[in-house]
Image: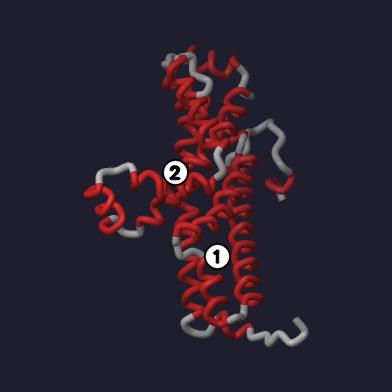
């Protein structure tokens, strides 16, 4: 280590600087898409978890336990290696060769399903924390059960669980690093590629750490702003959201 030749300039030299920027762009795109799909699915599954219609409730419970209990890396391997192998040969060839950025979309599917199962539990907890009087009041105004959930219960529940959703959002962006295992050229993959070509692993890995730190700080700041804007009057919110 004492004889290590530091060369931080490789981080902006071509083509290495371009590789890192390309990886950052992929990480941001991947994280944003997965957060969006995870939130939508999480709201749907979390709501179904407390429905009175048993088949839908059982489906939501099975969904949550299935995707939450299996490690994310195993799920990515399953979607990338196992699922195509179950397809007819012509379809399998089409999937691997004709779908642009197949690896990218595999991660979007796998990470979204995994994260949505975790977000669903947050949404369910938020709904359960709402007084039944809120639901009855919505029904008394003429809303149907569906309208009461859509316009009153779910919006309020989401506003209540923004702090834990912040943690899940951070987890989504950090879990994008696992995308390198199926060949997605995101930040971690590119930092390792820079190390392989330059033998300057310390600089490349440090750059990746700093990039992830900046991304997570941006996510936290954005979620704090959203929490402050959507805070429910009269309820206690985090001190940081008021600062």
Say which of 17 and 217 sits in front: 17
Q: CA distance from mark 1 to mark 2?
A: 23 Å
In the rendering, at what x and y percent does residue 29 appear? 45, 58
- Residue 223 visible in the current orientation: yes
In this rendering, the answer to whether 107 lies above or below 87 is below
Left or right placement of residue 169 versus residue 87 in this view: right
Which residue in the protein does label 2 denote?
37
- Residue 152 visible in the current orientation: no
Name the residue rendered at 60%, 49% in the picture: 171
Neighbourhood count class around disc 1 (C-alpha, 10 Å): few under 14, some 14–19, many 20 upward: many
In this rendering, the answer to whether 156 lies above or below 58 is below
Left or right placement of residue 30 versus residue 125 in this view: left
In this rendering, the answer to whether 236 lies above or below 81 is above
In this rendering, the answer to whether 51 lies above or below 109 is above
Name the residue rendered at 63%, 45% in the picture: 167
- At mark 2, the secondary structure is helix
Closer to the chain start, of discs 1 and 2, is: 2
Marks 1 & 2, CB-CB < 8 Å contact? no
Left or right placement of residue 105 versus residue 181 in this view: left
Which residue in the protein does label 1 denote?
188
């Amino acid at each position: 280590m004492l004889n290590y030749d530091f060369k931080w300039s490789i981080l902006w030299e071509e083509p290495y600087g371009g590789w890192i920027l390309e990886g950052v762009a992929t990480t941001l795109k991947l994280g944003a898409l997965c957060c969006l799909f995870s939130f939508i699915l999480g709201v749907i599954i979390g709501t179904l978890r407390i429905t009175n219609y048993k088949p839908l409730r059982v489906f939501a419970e099975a969904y949550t336990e299935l995707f939450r209990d299996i490690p994310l890396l195993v799920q990515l391997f399953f979607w990338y290696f196992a699922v195509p192998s179950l397809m007819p040969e012509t379809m399998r060839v089409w999937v691997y060769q004709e779908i642009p950025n197949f690896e990218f979309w595999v991660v979007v599917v796998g990470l979204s399903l995994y994260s949505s199962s975790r977000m669903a539990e947050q949404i369910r907890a938020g709904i359960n924390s709402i007084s039944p009087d809120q639901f009855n009041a919505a029904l008394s105004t003429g809303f149907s059960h569906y309208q009461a959930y859509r316009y009153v219960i779910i919006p309020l529940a989401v506003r209540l669980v923004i702090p834990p959703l912040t943690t899940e959002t951070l987890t989504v962006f950090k879990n994008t690093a696992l995308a390198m295992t199926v060949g997605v050229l995101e930040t971690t993959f590119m930092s390792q590629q820079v190390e392989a070509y330059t033998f300057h692993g310390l600089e490349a890995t440090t750059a990746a750490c700093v990039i992830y730190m900046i991304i997570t700080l941006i996510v936290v700041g954005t979620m704090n702003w959203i929490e402050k804007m959507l805070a429910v009057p009269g309820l206690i919110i985090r001190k940081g959201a008021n600062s």
